[in-house]
Amino acid sequence: MKYLATFHTHFSALRTSRSLTEAGIPAKMAPVPRKLSSSCGTCVRYEAPEPCLGRMDRDVECVYREDGGDFICVHRGE
């Protein structure tokens, strides 16, 4: 499945991208799609069998499952 994670800080996105990559999960940083936010921001896109919540940095805002052109929130950070 394809996932997209948004973060409160660019540094958290970077840390999560590295964590996923170190675990063998292909991940890349990208701009947050306009559909999710009109402000500037960085997200991490990755493909995995599950959302890998244990690999998210503590400043994760939301993890979405990509379903066609839709984004379904599967986890909202604190």
Image (cartoon, rainbow, N blue to C red):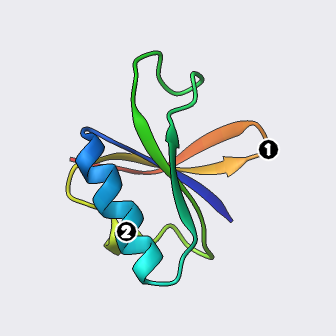
Q: Residue at x 79, y 44 (%)?
A: 68
Picture quadrant where residue 43 is located: top left
* In the depicted structure, whether residue 47 falls above or below residue 43: below
Which of the numbered marks, if any, corresponds to residue 18?
Answer: 2
Quickly name the residue at label 1: 68
* In the depicted structure, whether residue 7 falls above or below residue 48: above
Which of the numbered marks, if any, corresponds to residue 44?
Answer: none
Where does residue 1 sit, x and y in percent of width and height? 68, 65
Where does residue 67 sit, x and y in percent of width and height? 73, 48
Front-most of residues 43 and 77: 43
> Disc 2 residue type?
Arg
Q: Residue at x 59, y 44 (%)?
A: 72
> Disc 1 residue type?
Gly
Q: Residue at x 57, y 22 (%)?
A: 34
* In the depicted structure, whether residue 61 falls above or below residue 14: above
* Left or right: residue 18 compared with residue 35: left
Q: How many marks?
A: 2
Question: What is the CA distance from the residue labelled 2 to the residue labelled 1?
Answer: 26 Å
Mark 1 packing: few (<14 Cα in 10 Å), some, or many (20+)?
A: few
Q: Nearer the viewer, mark 2 or mark 1?
A: 2
Q: Residue at x 44, y 84 (%)?
A: 23
Q: Secondary structure at mark 1?
A: loop
Considering only order in the chain, which callout, 1 or 2, is on the residue closer to the N terminus? 2
Mark 2 packing: few (<14 Cα in 10 Å), some, or many (20+)?
A: some
The single residue placed furthest to the right in the displayed view is 68
